[in-house]
Image (cartoon, rainbow, N blue to C red):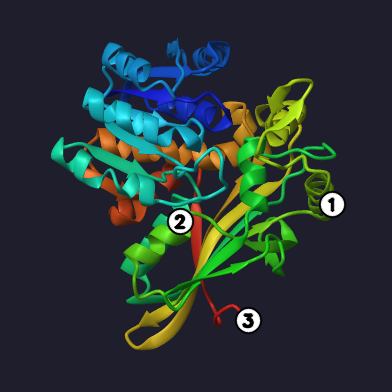
Amino acid sequence: MAKVLVIGAGGVSSVAVHKMAFNADIFTGIALASRTKTKCDAIAESVKQRTGIVIDTFQIDADDVIATTALIRQVQPVLVVNLALPYQDLHIMDACLEAGVNYMDTANYEPIDEARFEYSWQWAYQERFKAKGLMALLGSGFDPGVTSVFATWLKKHKLDTIRTLDILDCNGGDHGQHFATNFNPEINIREVTAPARHYLNGQWIETPALSTKQTFSFEGVGPKNMYLMYHEELESLAKHLPEIERIRFWMTFGDAYITHLTVLQNVGMTRIDPVMYNGQEVVPLQFLKAVLPEPASLGATTKGKTNIGDIATGYKDGEERTFYIYNICDHEEAYAETGNQAVSYTTGVPAMIGAALMVQGVWSGAGVFNIEQMDPDPYMDMLNAHGLPWQVKELAGPLEF
């Protein structure tokens, strides 16, 4: 039905490309490009062994707009799926505009020299995409992505309005390492060490990173400490669900992770500004990334489950009600299917689903869209059908914290 070009060759990309190959009736051609072609080739070989589908692979520096545009024209996809680094979003969007091709990503743009998640840069592309009749879909991962669709599904089917929304992200997996991150270490550590922010009555409230902690018992995992953080879907949900009074994002971390991260911060290894070493500039966090375990290598040893979902309190027919909607994903099952652990799986599967809905024309439009602006029902149906089944239950009342 359609050919797509996937840019990026990490764990999320591996899952997305495997799942695309499993759905060859939708994705009749798949091309994969990255700065390191050997990573693309390894994914392509795994896909061929598991599905028999042949993936075309290419080397590309996605920061080079001219080269990326040329590759898009060479491949001739109907959609570019950006699973590269968030720093590269705008360059890939520029290339899509130049080549006249639709665009999709899983994470919003972030400047390389500042840990600042903000949609303004990508929303500024609205008129350019609209003028060319092209669609750019932002944030079709899990969070952002599924968590945003969970919210709009609840509003469509369970609540007339949403008053408060809490997004809870729990990774209960154990990879056996002293310290490692389950996705790109540079992005993960920048995200975790940035100041926390949450939305309250039309204002953003900022607090120090990892300073607000609660304990929550997650089904399939058990009780875990979770910390208030900022995540980009808070910004877009506050815009597109304007009746919301409060939105918060929580993520779980074990005590060992927090201890290691604190030490790394204290000695300057999480800095994102360059320092001079032996006559050359080195960014400490990028060096740290080079010596930490590669997240894609953790799949074989990771055991346990993830549990990610939304708790929404609002009104239905004038009565206050609270619903909890969530997915539980097993690390070992994800690895058996795609060769990747559940953190990559829970982002890669939604990337495939968003791409499938776009190339089939189920979701369409001209301009730049966040995922919560789309009809949630076909997305929710595909989550159940492609490895991320969800469940919803009504709670006795709102969260107590």
Q: Is residue 252 above or below residue 337?
A: below
The disc label shown at residue 400, or none: 3
Spot occupied by residue 132 in the image (x, y as percentages of width and height):
15, 35
Which residue does the image show at 57% across and 47% down from the upper left? 115
Spot occupied by residue 204 in the image (x, y as percentages of width and height):
49, 69
Which residue does the image show at 41% across and 44% down from the upper left? 140
Name the kind of residue labelled 3 in the image: Glu
Q: Which image quarter: residue 6?
A: top left
Q: Is residue 314 above or below residue 136?
A: below
Which residue does the image show at 38% across and 35% down from the upper left? 90
Q: Which residue is mark 2?
A: 233
Spot occupied by residue 69 in the image (x, y as percentages of width and height):
31, 19
User: In front here: 263 or 71?
Assistant: 263
Q: Residues within 10 Å of mark 3 (few under 14, many from 20)?
A: few
Q: Residues within 10 Å of mark 2 (few under 14, many from 20)?
A: many
Q: Is residue 180 visible?
A: yes
| Quarter occupied by the C terminus | bottom right
